[in-house]
Image (cartoon, rainbow, N blue to C red):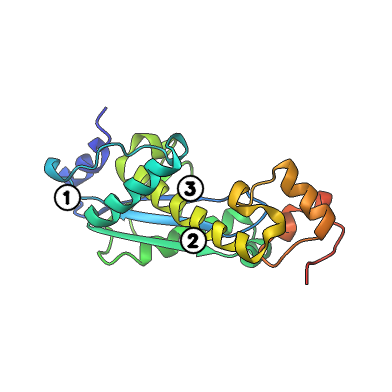
Amino acid sequence: MDLLDIERKYFEQGFSAVAGVDEVGRGPLAGPVVCAAVILPLEEEKRIPGIDDSKKLSAKKREQLAEKIKQTARAYSIQEVSAEVIDEINILQATRLCMKRAVESLSIPADMVLTDGNMTLDIAIPQKSIVKGDALVCSIGAASILAKVYRDELMCRFAIEFPEYGFERNAGYGTAAHIQAIRENGICSIHRKTFVKKFWDGKVKS
């Protein structure tokens, strides 16, 4: 199957701006959830080879593709929702909010939205969720790459501010070393309090 088949199918049905949307960072103990929305050109000569689920690509390949996507996309948007908001409204609702913001921030208004997994957004635009969409749909794969590269860079910047937790290595995920660092130091301002209850004693790093 051609990864642009679904976008082309909707184009043939009259949709002129099909946006793929994906998220990164639902599982980590720290940092925001990040979402991207991408509208790709459908012309064969503008195709970006190598787009796939971001988790299947090396960091270097993701970074190279992210630059090509930004240069080639008709429109793209990257949004984040903080750990504080995740704690307030839960990670599912925070992800839905983040995806909605990404769609609504596109410079070209989307008239069809394709989301990865099983996610329904609070938008007035036709939408379809596609299981494993990041590996099956080019625009969703592109969105996953943009979101992943953006979030990894963000967590590397947080690692400089909070060096105890190794964010440059774990991107906020719950590795054994990260959990041990929380036990020893408490949490910092970007930790998700609702995610660390099992091994957090209530101490906050000053």
Residue 160: where, in percent of width, then height? 61, 63
Whichever of labels 3 and 2 marks the residue nearer the N terminus, that label is 2
Q: Depth-wise, is mark 2 or mark 1 nearer the camera?
A: 2
Residue beneath the point at 47% across and 38% down:
55
Picture quarter with the N terminus: top left
Callout 2, which amino acid? Cys
| Residue at the image point whose x is 55% and y is 62% from the top | 157
Marked residue nearer the N-terminal end (1 or 3): 1
Q: On the image, numbered disc 3 is attached to which residue?
A: 119
Numbered label tally:
3
Q: Position of residue 159 (x, y in %)?
A: 62, 59
The part of the image, by quadrant, that contains residue 136 is top left
Question: Real-space Cα distance between discs 2 and 1?
Answer: 27 Å
Q: For the point 52% across and 60% down, which residue is it?
A: 154
Point 30% across, 36% down: residue: 50
Q: Which residue, given by chain and number where applicable, does mark 1 sit on?
A: 14
Q: Amino acid at mark 3?
A: Met
Q: Is residue 204 visible?
A: yes
Number of other residues with Cα within 10 Å of mark 1, as a class: few under 14, some 14 to 19, many 20 or more: few
**Image quadrant occupied by the C terminus:** bottom right
> From the viewer's perspective, is 59 left or right of 52?
right
Which of the labelled discs sits on residue 98, or is there none?
Answer: 2
